[in-house]
Amino acid sequence: MRLVGVVFGVAVFGTIAFGPAVLAASAKLGTSPSQRQVGEADRNCQFALQAMRSGNVSKAKSLYGKALKLFPDFPDALTGLGHVAMTERHFDQALEHFQGAERAYQTFSSTLFELQMERYQHSQEQVAAIRDEIRDTQRAIAARMAYGETGRLEQHIMQLEGQVQQLENAKPPDASNTSEPGELHFYIGNALFNMNRLDKALDEWETCARMTPRFPLVYNNLAVAYWKMGRLDRAIESLTRAERLGLPINPSFKSDLEKSAAEQGPPVPEKVGDARIGAR
C-alpha cells in the first residue's frame, strides 16, 4: 500500500511580545539584547514569515538569520529556520533548530516565571504604598475643607485610585502555563518522521496532541503513524478526530485506511487509559 496523507505545517506562531521581563531574562542568559534589538529581531521574524508564505525561502532564511544575530535565543527565529530547513529537505538541521527553539522556550519559561513573580510582588508593594498616599491625601483634604482648596487633592486621589485598580487587575503568574507551544512538537515530529525515526516522531505528535488537543494537523499525522505501525483502530480514531476538527482529509488515505481495517477485522482494545489520543 502507498503511504499518503502526511502533512507538514508551515509556521503558525504569531508575534511574541517580549517586554522588559524578557530583556532581563536574556541578560541572565548572557545575550543582553536591548529593547531596540528585540524589536528589530521580532520585525525580522514577521517579514520572514511573510516571505515564507510567498515562497521566498532564501529571503526568509536571511531574515531569520538577522533576527538570531540580534537575539541568539529568539524562539520564533529558531522555529522559522526549522521550517526553512524542512523546505530545503535538510531534516537534520530542521530537527536541530526546532529542538533549539524548545530549549529556548524552556529556558525562558523558568526565568520568566521568576521575573514575573518578582514583578507581581512589586506591584502588590506598590498598591500598599499608593493606599498609604491616598490616606495621607484624604487627611490633607480634611484639614483644608474649611478653605475649599481640595480640588487638586481630590483629583490626585482619583489618579491614585486608578493606579491601584490597574495594579490589582494583574494576576499572579501561573507556573503551569509557561511551557513551549504544543505545535512545536508537531514540527519536531515531522523532522523525525522524515529521518525515518517513526517511534520518536509518534512520541512528539502524541505530546502535541496532549498539549494542543484542538490542533487538527497532528491527528492526521498520528493516523499515518498508527497505520504504519498496524494500529488501525487508533489510526481511524485519529483521522476521525482531525476531520471533526475541520481538517480536509485525503480521501485516498481515508479509503485505504478503512479498507485495511476491514481486512484486519475487529481491533483488540488498547489499554491506554488517559493517554488515549482522540478520547472524547
Image (cartoon, helix red, strand yellow):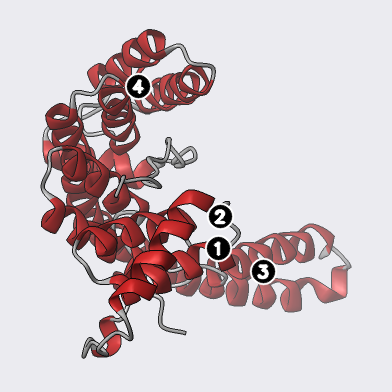
N-terminal-most mark, 4 or 3: 4
Residue neighbourhood size for the residue with mark 3, other residues' Cα within 10 Å, grouped as few (<14), some (14–19), many (≥20): some
N-terminal-most mark, 4 or 2: 4
Badge nearest the viewer, 3 or 1: 1
Residue neighbourhood size for the residue with mark 4, other residues' Cα within 10 Å, grouped as few (<14), some (14–19), many (≥20): some
Amino acid marked by disc 4: Gln
Amino acid marked by disc 3: Glu
Amino acid marked by disc 1: Glu
N-terminal-most mark, 3 or 1: 3
Location of residue 136 in the rendering, given as x and y in whole percent from the top left corner: 59, 73
For residue 176, which quarter of the picture?
Answer: bottom left
Task: Find disc 4 in the rendering and name its residue.
Answer: 37
Residue at image point 42% right, 27% down: 42
Residue at image point 55% right, 72% down: 168
Q: Could you tell me which secondary element the residue under label 4 belongs to? A: helix
Q: Could you tell me which secondary element the residue under label 2 belongs to? A: loop
Task: Find disc 1 in the rendering and name its residue.
Answer: 243
Residue at image point 34% right, 66% down: 260
Disc number for residue 247: 2
Say whether marks 4 and 2 touch (CB < 8 Å).
no
Q: Could you tell me which secondary element the residue under label 1 belongs to? A: helix
N-terminal-most mark, 3 or 2: 3
**Distance CA(mark 3)–CA(mark 2):** 49 Å
Say whether marks 2 and 1 touch (CB < 8 Å).
yes
Residue 212 in view in this figure: no
Residue neighbourhood size for the residue with mark 2, other residues' Cα within 10 Å, grouped as few (<14), some (14–19), many (≥20): some
Location of residue 134 in the rendering, given as x and y in whole percent from the top left corner: 61, 72
Say whether marks 3 and 1 touch (CB < 8 Å).
no
Drawn side of residue 154 relative to residue 93, left or right: right
Residue 14 in view in this figure: yes
